[in-house]
């Protein structure tokens, strides 16, 4: 019998588990330091997506993240964004990373230490075990509460036996959202958090990227929006774009761009692209620890306050 170390309250919500596929192989092929850097960067990205979609990161378990969402639609959209974001990213050794994601909605127990537990948590964890790489699965309970406009973005895979369940369980695959679904979501502020704005600081200068100012070009040439006249910086070094409700950094340089999320681990891009989440530092041409201060940009993504354009 499980002994609860803290008092708990019963509520409703959606639990999401995201698991990095083959992390053991990463440690074997890349070595401990490079693999840890890659896994940490992935977890940071996933955590940022959780928070962008009004979820809470409950805990990270090595190569796995557990999150709670009050609204199952927000959890569903976060799962699609996780697959899309990680699928387009490259980490240590220029390797791609693959995910498995499970979602279940129902009654959950919330301990006063911040943890969530109960059958809903166990079911979400079991769904991850059924996933193939690059796949997200949700329960019938999640599928049942999705708006009708989202129904075309799920498909039933039939009934499966889940450990600890007496009866077979119907499982649905989460499919990529269409542009129409993204538009529908924009019109539902109760599901998604407010529109986002990217703030950038370069020395004493300030820049923003949002739907009013969707592009910022950075480089050594005088016709860039942000000019950085340093030898390691390319004439047209990078582009930051507000695209499909997110901020995408596109490296176009010779020496590369380093991104350090939340002032912790860093990722190097070379003629590649990566979505920006949360906050951190962008370094032009070399690692943040080796850069001239003029080659550093501090970024932060925040919700837009108020309404209207």
Image: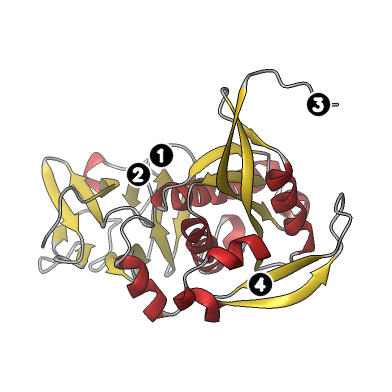
Crowding near pointer 4: few (<14 within 10 Å), some, many (20+)?
A: some
Compute the Cα span from label 1 to label 3.
36 Å
Task: Find out whether the residues at labels 4 and 1 contact each other: C-beta distance under 8 Å.
Answer: no
Which mark sits nearer the N-terminus, 4 or 1?
A: 4
**Point 39% across, 57% down: residue:** 191
Position in image of residue 133 (x %, y %): 71, 67
Element at label 4: strand
Q: Which numbered disc, 2 or 4, marks the residue closer to the eye? A: 4
Q: Residue at x 56, y 44 (%)?
A: 12
Q: Earlier in the sequence, mark 1 or mark 3?
A: 3
Give the answer, above or below, for where 305 lies relative to 220.
above
Which label sits in the foreground, 3 or 4? 3
Q: Which mark is residue 262?
A: 1
Residue 139 in sight from this viewpoint: no
Mark 1 vs 2, N-terminal side: 1
Image-based side of 251 in relation to 296, left or right? right
What residue does disc 4 label? 173
Q: Nearer the viewer, mark 4 or mark 1?
A: 4
Q: For mark 3, give the secondary structure.
A: loop
Q: Is residue 79 positioned above or below 300 on the image?
A: below
Split into 4 quadrants, where in the image is the N terminus? Answer: top right
70 vs 67, nearest the viewer: 70
Per the image, the residue denoted by label 2 is 279
**Crowd around label 2: few <14 · some 14–19 · many ≥20 (10 Å):** some
Mark 1–mark 2 distance (CA, rounded to whole Å): 5 Å
Instruction: Give the alpha-carbon distance from disc 2 to disc 4, as whole Å.
Output: 31 Å
Mark 1 touching mark 2, by CB under 8 A?
Answer: yes
Q: CA distance from mark 3 to mark 4?
A: 32 Å
According to the picture, the residue beneath numbered tag 3 turns out to be: 2
């Amino acid at each position: 019998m499980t002994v609860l170390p803290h008092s708990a309250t019963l509520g409703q919500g959606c639990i999401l588990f995201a698991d990095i596929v083959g992390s053991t192989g990463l440690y074997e092929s890349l070595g401990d330091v490079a693999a840890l850097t890659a896994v940490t960067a992935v977890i940071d990205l996933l955590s940022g997506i959780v928070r962008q979609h009004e979820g809470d990161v409950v805990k990270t378990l090595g190569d796995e993240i557990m999150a709670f969402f009050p609204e199952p639609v927000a959890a569903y959209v976060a799962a699609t964004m996780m697959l899309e974001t990680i699928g387009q990213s490259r980490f240590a050794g220029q390797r791609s990373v693959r995910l498995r994601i499970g979602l279940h909605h129902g009654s959950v127990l919330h301990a006063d230490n911040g943890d969530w537990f109960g059958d809903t948590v166990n079911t979400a964890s079991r769904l991850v075990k059924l996933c193939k790489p690059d796949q997200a699965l949700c329960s019938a309970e999640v599928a049942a509460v999705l708006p009708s406009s989202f129904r075309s973005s799920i498909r039933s895979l039939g009934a499966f036996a889940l450990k600890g369940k007496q009866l077979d369980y119907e499982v649905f695959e989460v499919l990529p959202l269409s542009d129409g679904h993204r538009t529908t979501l924009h019109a539902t502020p109760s599901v998604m958090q407010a529109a986002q704005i990217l703030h950038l600081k370069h020395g004493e200068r300030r820049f923003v990227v949002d739907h009013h100012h969707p592009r910022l070009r950075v480089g050594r040439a005088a016709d860039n929006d942000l000019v950085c006249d340093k030898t390691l910086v390319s004439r047209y070094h990078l582009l930051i774009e507000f695209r499909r409700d997110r901020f995408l950094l596109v490296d176009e340089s010779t020496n590369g761009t380093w991104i350090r999320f939340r002032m912790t681990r860093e990722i190097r891009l070379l003629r590649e692209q990566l979505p920006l989440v949360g906050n951190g530092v962008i370094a032009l041409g070399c690692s943040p620890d080796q850069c001239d201060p003029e080659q550093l940009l501090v970024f932060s993504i925040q919700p837009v306050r108020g309404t209207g354009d």
